[in-house]
Image (cartoon, rainbow, N blue to C red):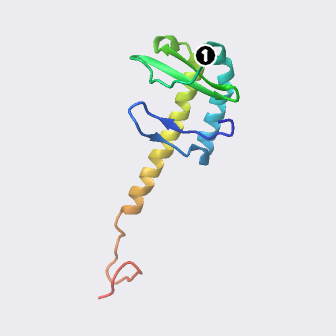
């Protein structure tokens, strides 16, 4: 969305949500949304939401006029200066930023689960005195 909210859904299921809480994700999402109007001439209005075919990429754009879509081959996206190529690579940056946030959260969880180092003779709230 234009406010920088970002959710990524994988065609195999699952995904990542809540990107708007992170500035890097918000900035990448805003850049992605800003490029979408340039790709709109290649899109058609739709009420169906199929997954992309083999070696294809499908784009969906939610607009006030409805949902629009297009599907193209991965080879077509090789040119990052084309409308769909630019949209694809900017979308990949959103995914990259969201993965970095996810990795950071995983690392923080690991740090939280590490056992506290104990020093003989030193008593903390977490350790029992003997």
Query: Which residue corresponds to the image point at 51% horizontal and 16% vertical from the top-left?
Result: 71
Residue 115 placement: quadrant: bottom left
Which quarter shows the C terminus? Answer: bottom left
The image quarter in which residue 39 lies: top right
Q: Give the x, y percent position of residue 25.
A: 59, 40
Which residue in the structure is indicated by mark 1? Answer: 44
Which residue is found at the position 65% from the left and 24% from the top?
Answer: 36
Taking the spot 41% from the left edge, 81% from the top edge, the residue there is 125
Q: Is residue 100 above or below residue 55?
A: below
Q: Residue furthest left?
A: 130
Q: Residue 12 sits in which quadrant?
A: top left
Q: How many marks?
A: 1
The foreground one among 52 and 101 is 52
Image quarter hosting the N terminus:
top right
Which residue is outermost to the bottom? 130
Q: Residue 87: horizontal and vertical position, in percent?
A: 59, 22
Q: 10 Å neighbourhood of mark 1: few (<14), some, or many (≥20)?
A: few
Q: Residue furthest front?
A: 47
Q: Position of residue 76 (x, y in %)?
A: 51, 11
Where residue 19 appears, as percent x and y from the top left, is: 56, 43
Left or right: where does residue 45 sit relative to residue 130? right
* For residue 22, above or below residue 1: below
- The residue lying at 66 percent from left, 13 percent from top is 41
Q: Which secondary structure lies at badge 1?
A: strand
> Going by the image, does 84 lie left or right of 110?
right
- Relative to 31, is 112 on the left or the right? left
Horizontally, residue 16 falls left or right of residue 29, namely: left
């Amino acid at each position: 969305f234009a406010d920088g909210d970002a959710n990524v859904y994988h065609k195999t299921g699952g995904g990542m949500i809540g990107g708007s809480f992170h500035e890097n994700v918000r900035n990448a999402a805003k850049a992605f949304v800003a490029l979408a109007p340039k790709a709109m001439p290649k899109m058609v209005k739709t009420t169906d939401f199929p997954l992309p075919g083999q070696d294809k990429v499908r784009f969906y754009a939610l607009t006030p006029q409805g949902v629009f879509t297009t599907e193209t081959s991965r080879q077509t996206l090789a040119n990052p200066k084309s409308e769909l190529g630019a949209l694809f690579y900017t979308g990949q940056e959103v995914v990259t930023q969201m993965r970095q946030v996810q990795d950071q959260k995983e690392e923080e969880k690991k740090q939280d689960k590490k056992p506290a180092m104990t020093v003989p003779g030193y008593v903390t709230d977490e350790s029992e005195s003997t």
